[in-house]
Image (cartoon, grey):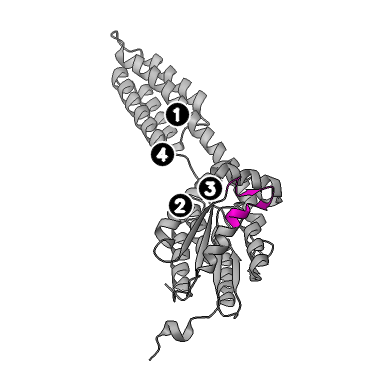
Amino acid sequence: MADYDEVFRPPTKFVIVAGAIAAGKTTLSEAVSKRLGWELSMEPVKTNPFLRKFYAEMTESNKKEEQLKQARLMRIRALEHAHEMCDELVKQKEEVNPEKVLSVVCSFLFSSAQHVSPEFTQVMAQIMTQIEQKANPREVSQRLLHEVDAELAREKSSGDEHVEFPTAFSMQIFLLSERFDLHQRIVWSGKNYIQDRGIYEDLIFGKMLADSGKMGQLEYGTYRAIFHRMTNFLHRPDLIIYLDVKPEVAVRRMHIRGRECEKDVSLEYLTALCAGYENWLKTEVEGFIPLHRVDWNDDSLKDGVIDEEKMKGIIDRIAQIKRRPVYF
């Protein structure tokens, strides 16, 4: 009796071109489609109702995060200055003047009111009350130094704050749904297809959003569960062609093509994205889906023209496809 693979395996070939933003996926996909006479499936950029809003949120989030970062640095500087003043009080040999302690606290609160946490401001108020109640000035100074040092340690270890994107989860679910539909249509179309970015790469962007604090962990866990449940029922492609591009090259190509929604995508983001792709290749692709990795920097794609030797290598690798694995 024939097994599932023999009965349901589509007789056509299916190749996905993968790579970071502006790697050159569309250029290669179109060239392969034209050279081999295959159908072409493009990434759903124009039909994505969330994309423009998502990139706008990215820009706004970056601004807010920079403001939060600067505020945190101001808090640290204020606390370090307070530490120096308190340390001087504690170490002096003569009797500590309570008015001097009060002066230090007031000076600190006045100069740092906008930069320290409300909780710490409350602690400072308690210390002022101790001074007014004639508490031992040296003991008050020691408590002040202790509280300042504890707050300083918390600030230095807290790390930078992140701002979530309201549309992050919605966009990932939209893309997952769209790509699932595209994948199924391709597999059962009865035609050979090359696809510009497939469903499997969505996991990279979801993880990046979660790792950077742009998507909540609860939302990411839900998204990841839906992703794996859906892709478990898909026939895998015959081959993934990965375009290996340096982040600096991707930034330059992105600026050349000039999409309005991508104008604020930073080198830092693309560097993290390329690292995400490397992790994805190791954990989600290698050993599961046949992979053809190609150096796709300036010597491979220059001014929109593909190096013919590289193109021949890709076409030869596609010609080696014999059969498709079933599914995950």
Type of amino acid under label 1: Ile
Q: What amino acid does circle 2 point to?
A: Glu
Q: Dot 1, how many residues are within 10 Å of its Cα: few (below 14), some (14-19), or many (20+)?
A: many
Mark 3 / mark 2, whichever is N-terminal? 3
Indicate which disc residue 158 carries. 4
Residue at the far bottom in the pictured view: 1
Element type at mark 1: helix
Instruction: Tell me where the magenta segment starts and ends, as one range.
Output: 297-311
Q: Position of residue 98 (x, y in %)?
A: 36, 16
User: Circle 1 is placed at which residue position?
Assistant: 76
**For residue 11, which numbered disc appears in the image?**
none
318 or 235: which is nearer to us? Answer: 318
Q: Is residue 78 above or below residue 262?
A: above
Which badge, 1 or 3, is on the more N-terminal residue? 1
At 39% from the left and 86% from the top, the residue drawn is 3
Say which residue label 3 marks: 163
Determine whether the residue tagged by mark 3 lies in a helix, strand or loop. Answer: loop
